[in-house]
Amino acid sequence: MNETPHSLSSARTLWDLLDRRARLTPDLPVLLQGDRTVTFGRLRALAERTAAGLYGLGVRPGTVVTWQLPTRVETVVLSCALARLGAVQSPVIPFHRERETGFALRESRAEFFAVPGVWRGFDHTAMARRLGAKGVLEVYGGLPDGDPDVLPPPPAEGTSVRWIYWTSGTTSAPKGVLHTDRSLIAGGSCLAHALRPRPDDIGSIAFPYAHIGGPDYLVMLLLYGFPAVLFERFALPDALEDLRRHGVTVAGGSTAFYSMFLAEQRGRPGARVVPSLRLLAGGGAPKPPELYHAVTRELGVALTHGYGMTEVPMITMGDPDDSAENLATTEGRPPEGMEIRIVDGEVRLRGEAVCRGYLDPAQTAEAFDAEGFLRTGDLGRLTPSGHLVLTGRLKDVIIRKGENVPAREIEDLLSAHPGVGDVAVIGLPDAERGERVCAVVEQPEGAAPLTLADVTAYLRAEGLSVHKLPEQLEVVDALPRGETLRKVLKYKLRERYAGA
């Protein structure tokens, strides 16, 4: 076979891409986790047997299957098996709870729900039963198995919607983002061709595989034929042993990961924490220029940062060979086929990697302009060299560790607290998280003083996911408001508390 990464990126479907890679390099490793090694050929074989097992349970082309699983070999196999069947899969981040998970199950009309059982002290199976989920499957320790001979032919085209990802966006309820195999392959190709991995590279997936970055990364592995270490839970220094043992050369995920590596290095001066590491790469959260310079100076590795979102998994990406100025101050350049237009300061996008819209047709109509460009809600500008610089956001959403945290959802919940008269939730710059969640509260007269512990305990009881909980609480006599409509002036709060 005379396949190249660029020729492989023309694969019709995700299964077609896996099949072509497995035929090309069946014995090369693709997934590494603990003492386990899965080759490309083995991944295809496991996925086919799992697909046959799912078929025996009633999963057919077009069947909606929601899965809420940690980053494990079984998770990748299950997702590939569903791609083999042509099912519609709806991944849910494993730390989501009743509010987000129940919404995803209802809105997608899932016919099956794959869960890990009890994971990290939380019983996902019990939650599934409370939510009345259909077809609950516990797949943490074992996957459905069957004879591949029973399978129908794999899907022949990759332009049908077969993926529903969830983003909170700017509203209190999540939005179901509709993707095709081809849009995910296009997004992953952007990442892969920008980073230009080497045959001897060892990557790492330290973020939830249920994130839109999961297939992004898998596509890169399939295009370039190198493996990645999977981390079910990533924390330093705990992950150092596996990073070193496997000789990881490419790591990252988002701004929070860069900060973790930098902090670990500062605690171990005189020796590189991961001697094999040559590149940190990621996106999903703002990257301060000073963080870029600190990483390259102190860790002695390259750092490339990109811009993506659930609707468009990869929009731009830094080039390892680019200038330090561009790598520090821009989000990189778009790949061939990604059109970026700046309209009244807003970044708008058109291309194969852009989603097909949302489950709610009204949201789709609102999101795209008359020429088919997606309105991102982000503000930016293009430099003469074609690099994208992001300058702010139209939408009121906080990006914490690469995950969207809608301010309104937290505000709506806190407004019902008896100790809260009015509240504004804002994102503040944070070197580790990208942004941190801060709640600014007006208390009613005579209310008992409110503490951060009170706020987080209340929100936990309301079922809010842990990653959305405020990390800072400020109590004020009066929130700043505009004179005309008396709207809260959040920019004044950001200015006041940015350095707190």
Image (tube, helix red, strand yellow):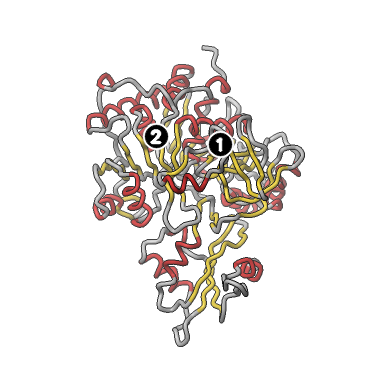
Pick the front one: 93 or 236:
93
Q: Position of residue 420 (x, y in %)?
A: 45, 76
- From the image, tell me which residue sits under label 2: 162
Q: Residue at x 43, y 21 (%)?
A: 19
Q: Position of residue 319 (x, y in %)?
A: 68, 35
The secondary element bearing badge 1 is classed as loop
Q: Residue at x 53, y 63 (%)?
A: 437
Pick the front one: 145 or 168:
168
The secondary element bearing badge 2 is classed as strand
Q: Nearer the viewer, mark 2 or mark 1?
A: 2
Q: Position of residue 129 (x, y in %)?
A: 24, 52
Q: Is residue 455 left or right of residue 490?
A: left
What amino acid type is highlighted by mark number 2? Arg
Vertical position of residue 428 compared to residue 251: above or below: below
User: Which one is earlier in the sequence, the residue at label 2 or at label 1?
Assistant: 2
The circle drawn on residue 248 is 1
Can the viewer see residue 39? Answer: no
